Structures are given as structure tokens and as C-alpha cells.
Amino acid sequence: MHRLEVYESNVVTVEPQYSCVDVADEMDARSVGCVVVVDGDKPLGIITDRDLICRLVAADRDPEKTTAAEVMTADPITATRDDDMTDVLARMRERGIRRIPLVEENQLVGLVSLDEVIIKVASYLFNTSQGLLGGLHQSRRTAPHRRRLEAREAAFDELRDQLQHMGSEVREHLDQLLSRVRRGK
């Protein structure tokens, strides 16, 4: 399958001491469903919009006083750009997650989201099916044309055989005529 960087999207980061209000504001401003909590470029955790609902709102915690570090999923599962997409999707499925931070040398470089993967794979499958349908349509159009050309050639060959007993001048004229027909003139 493709390298993970094909499915990579920009990642929004916050620091562990951010309040949950700041985290929610950042998610809203950037129109994203998750942020990665970092120390420098090292990923410490991940916070999704669902985490804010379950660990903050449902727990009746004060969003001004609760920090990103308190609601994040610590030590998130990560992947590298060289990881096999099938393996990464299997890890996502078995853990019930939709986003995985991409790291290189323990530094955050991007994010792979299941939504992005689905959109790109669906687009690839659509384009592939359109190409196959176009090829099928073209072969349907060319097959009758090819059969007509073969039938015309067979008819000309039969005509040539029948005229074989005629003089060479008639055969030359017929060969010139056949040559022009074959060239499309």
C-alpha cells in the first residue's frame, strides 16, 4: 500500500499546560477534531473532541482550571512515514482510534487520520474504476470496428482471388484501389 505521508495532514499542537478552554478554542479556530500535546516537538499525548466531552464536560470539571495534560490520552500510539498502511490501519482498528501522530526520530512531523485515508482511498478507487470503465467502453467501440475491418479485408481478398484470372492491368488497378482504401484515402 502507499506510504503514510500520502495520507498525512497538518497537525495542530498544544502544550501540556494549556487550559481545556484554550484547547477547545484552538480546535475550533483550526477546524480540527484533535490536537497533539507536545513538549517541544515530542508528542506526549493526544486530545480529541470526544476526550473533551467525556473527560471534561461529563466529569463536570472546570475547563479553565483543567489542563491539556489532565485530559489527554498519554503516550499515544504513533507511526512513521515508512510504516505499512495496512499495519497502521490494523492498529487503529484494534485500539478504536481514528488518528495517529507521525513521528521521525521521536519528533512529531504530521498526523494520519482515518477520515483522510478513507477520502483518498475512495478517490483512488473512483479514479481507477473510471479508467477501467473508459477502457471497457473503448474496447466495446473498437471491437466492432476491428471486426468490420477484418470483414472488409476478407471481402477484398476474396474479390482478388475471383479476379485472379483477369488480366494484370485489372489486378494492378484493384491493388491500387485496395492500397488507397487501407490508407483511408
Image (cartoon, rainbow, N blue to C red):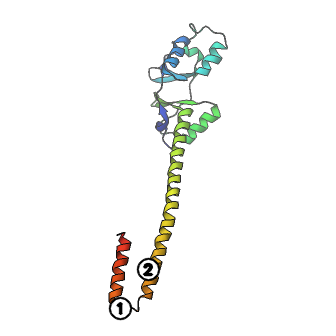
What is the crowding at mark 2: few (fewer than 14 residues within 10 Å), some, or many (at least 20)?
some
On the image, numbered disc 1 is attached to which residue? 167
**Spatial separation of the CA atoms under disc 1 and disc 2:** 17 Å
Q: Vertical placement of 51 versus 157: above or below?
A: above
Q: Quadrant of residue 77?
A: top right
Please report whichever mark, 1 or 2, sits nearer to the chain's N-terminal start.
2
Q: Amino acid at mark 2?
A: Phe
Q: Amino acid at mark 1?
A: Gly
Q: Vertical placement of 95 versus 178: above or below?
A: above
On the image, numbered disc 2 is attached to which residue? 156
- Is 169 displayed left or right of 153 in the figure? left
Residue in view at x 35 percent, y 70 percent: 183
Please, what secondary structure does the residue beneath circle 1 have? loop
Give the tally of numbered discs: 2
Residue in view at x 65 percent, y 18 percent: 54
Query: Depth check: 3 or 145 in front?
Result: 145
Q: Is residue 84 visible?
A: no
Percent from the top left, x then y, of residue 61?
63, 9
Query: Depth check: 156 or 53 in front?
Result: 156
Please state, as top left, top right, bottom left or bottom right, where the C terminus lies in the image: bottom left
Q: Vertical placement of 63 versus 108: above or below?
A: above
Percent from the top left, x then y, of residue 166?
38, 91
Label ID, residue 25: none
Q: Quadrant of residue 99?
A: top right
Query: Depth check: 166 or 22 in front?
Result: 166
Q: Is residue 137 visible?
A: yes
Q: Vertical placement of 135 versus 37: above or below?
A: below
Please, what secondary structure does the residue beneath circle 2 have? helix
Percent from the top left, x then y, of residue 18?
51, 12
Percent from the top left, x then y, of residue 29?
49, 18
